[in-house]
Image (cartoon, grey):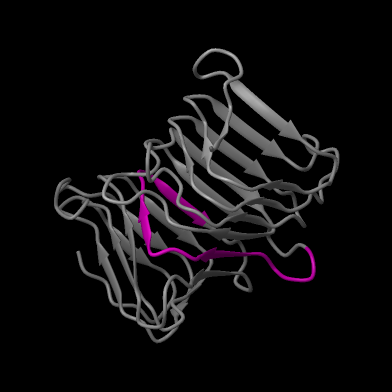
Amino acid sequence: MPCKWPGGAAAALTTITTSGDTVTVTGAVDLNARGLTVDSTAAGGSAAGANISFNQTIDGAGALTLTGGTLGDVTITGATGNGTALTGLTITGNDISLGNIGGAAAGVSGATSVTAADGAGPDAGSITLTGTTYNQNQLTLNAGAATNAVQVAGGAAAALTTITTSGDTVTVTGAVDLNARGLTVDSTAAGGSAAGANISFNQTIDGAGALTLTGGTLGDVTITGRRATARR
């Protein structure tokens, strides 16, 4: 039986708040077409925050916002929106670990924004993609300064991680480490949205893996850093 949020009418917002204390959710989550906000910073009153973790799937046609603060790590182990797409996904925290989003269809129908803390705590803040499928609409990964990193870590070495949108932008801020894995970013949904959309990386891309970027007929592809192979 999954954790369900039946409070209020459809699209109502449920808020879980702590003052710098951890939030741990064990079991599949069904948002029931309602929004869920989990904030371990007490709306900024405890800016350091604390860890937030979900260990299974999150579904249910609602918007999910997770705020871990400058020191709180945010971890989602299961797939997000693989059964029923979320309407939006916003994650902020120190280190962020994110499993699969969606599958054959988009896992988030609105925007997905993931922002790691910039230089806070004993580590510099990172975003780790522990899954291999990220199928959503507009995607922003922001790992901050050059010392931070977006880590591709799903599957064994040489596994392929795929980021797909249906004609929506993909923006990656921060150095990228492929970790000997392949990464494909396709804003055309495998040709279903042939016009595509812009794809941008603003720092270095390293890591002994193959990189394929598909921006479609109207999407611009921009790499500011070094070591990449792009296709438009």
* Residue lying at the far bottom of the rendered structure: 208
Residue 156: quarter of image:
bottom left
In terms of depth relative to the viewer, which is nearer, 4 or 99? Answer: 4
The residue at 79%/39% (across/down) is: 44
User: Quick check: 74 left or right of 123?
Assistant: left
Q: Is residue 222 magenta?
A: no
- For this view, does 44 lie left or right of residue 59? right
* Quadrant including the C terminus: bottom left
Q: Is residue 115 left or right of residue 225?
A: right
Stretch in magenta: 121-141
Residue 221: percent from the left, percent from the top?
29, 61
In the rendered image, residue 130 lying in the magenta stretch gets the answer yes
Name the residue: 64% across, 25% down: 14
Residue 210, compared with residue 10, is above or below; it is below
Is residue 14 shown above or below 190? above
Marks counted in the figure total 0
Return the x and y of residue 194 as percentages of the image width and height: 14, 49
Quadrant in the rendering for residue 60: top left
Query: Looking at the picture, how far across and down is residue 7, in whole percent?
Result: 61, 18
- Is residue 49 found left or right of 91 in the rendered image? right
